[in-house]
Image (tube, rainbow, N blue to C red):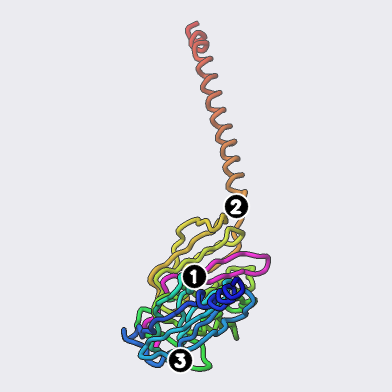
Amino acid sequence: MKLPILAFFLWTLPLISAVNISGKAVNASRDSSAAAALVLLQKLGAGDAEPVTVASRFTNDGFFSFALSNWDTTATYFLAADYSGLRSYSPALDLSAGNIRTVVAVYDTTRSAGNLSVRMHHVIVEQADNVLQIRETRVFVNNGLLAVAAAPQHPLFTISLPKGADHFFPAPGQADDPAFSDGRVLVSGSLPPGQRSISFGYQIPKSSKRAALSIHITHPTQMFDLFAADGPLQFDSPVLIDVGNFMIRGSAYRRYHAEELGAGTVTVFYSERKAASPLPATALLAGLILGGGLLYGLLSERNHAAAGGPDDSRKKSH
């Protein structure tokens, strides 16, 4: 009897562990069902270089469903939806919760960037021997109902870097890494309604004389901050306000701030910080010595006059 029971248990184990994943693809641009969207069930395991498609379905009036009999407990599962030439993703699925119902939002697309703006643009400048090491982060906001998408084989938009920029690197963890070509950053992918951060770093040669650092403002920007690391250089700008020292992860920076900037360029000038001249201190010391000598002479004459006054009077009385 034990063997048939064990065989039945092993046969029903996949059914016990089966998960039904169902839901709806919603066109968030129109607030309606996304008909004929392709929904993919994908996973990303520790050894996967990119997501692996487990199953795919075209929606039926926006609805979809998947039956997953067993799964890799070490992998992350999620849904992707292809619609209007754009791929959207769901949050990670918690398969341990059993049957799952979820919604995947998709968007109509546009080439127009009229609804894009930048909520926050941070520039961090570090000083090395012969270069300035610069990191930029922009938080883009799409205030429209359509996803802004690039034309095929074209970037979404470009960002011009200062002259001589090299050693470019994108910050890790971005959905679509920006690329670098001919002094410009090429931003790819799309900007659906909401926010997207774009971060990268580079370096430029440091001038031994007073020089300008120009930062490209691609879109109207709500808040702009440049943080200059404490060091031998000093910075000034006709546009930015020096708001004092600022600490970032235990390191001291000088913060320069502006708000409500239009598209264009922010220019910051930098130069070697001048050492305090010893001349004023020397002159002050000499003045103190000279003043002290004069005061001592006046007091001595006064004391001498006070001491000799009565003797002169006595001489005259005789």
| Type of the residue with mark 1 | Ser
Q: Which label was assigned to residue 85?
A: 3
Is mark 3 in CB contact (under 8 Å) with mark 2?
Answer: no
> In which image quadrant can residue 204 be found?
bottom right
Which stretch did the figure color magenta? 110-137
Real-space CA distance between mark 3 and mark 2, rounded to the nearest whole angstrom: 62 Å
* Placement of 300 over or under 65, stated as above or below: above
Secondary structure mostly taken by the magenta-highlighted segment of the chain:
strand
The single residue placed furthest to the front in the displayed view is 1
Q: Secondary structure at mark 2?
A: loop
Query: Residue 199 location in percent, x, y?
Result: 53, 73
Q: Quadrant of residue 243?
A: bottom left
Q: Position of residue 140 (x, y in %)?
A: 44, 76
Q: What is the secondary structure assignment of the residue under circle 1?
A: helix
Exactly how many numbered labels are in the figure? 3
Seen in the picture, residue 151 relative to 241 is either above or below; the reply is below
Read off the residue under disc 1: 96
Mark sitting earlier along the chain (3/2): 3
Question: Which residue is nearer to you in this view: 115 or 128?
Answer: 115
Residue position for label 2: 276
Does residue 174 appear in this view?
A: no
Report how far apart the C-alphas of labels 2 and 1 lie in the structure: 67 Å
Residue type of the residue flagged with mark 2: Ala
As displayed, is residue 222 above or below residue 299? below
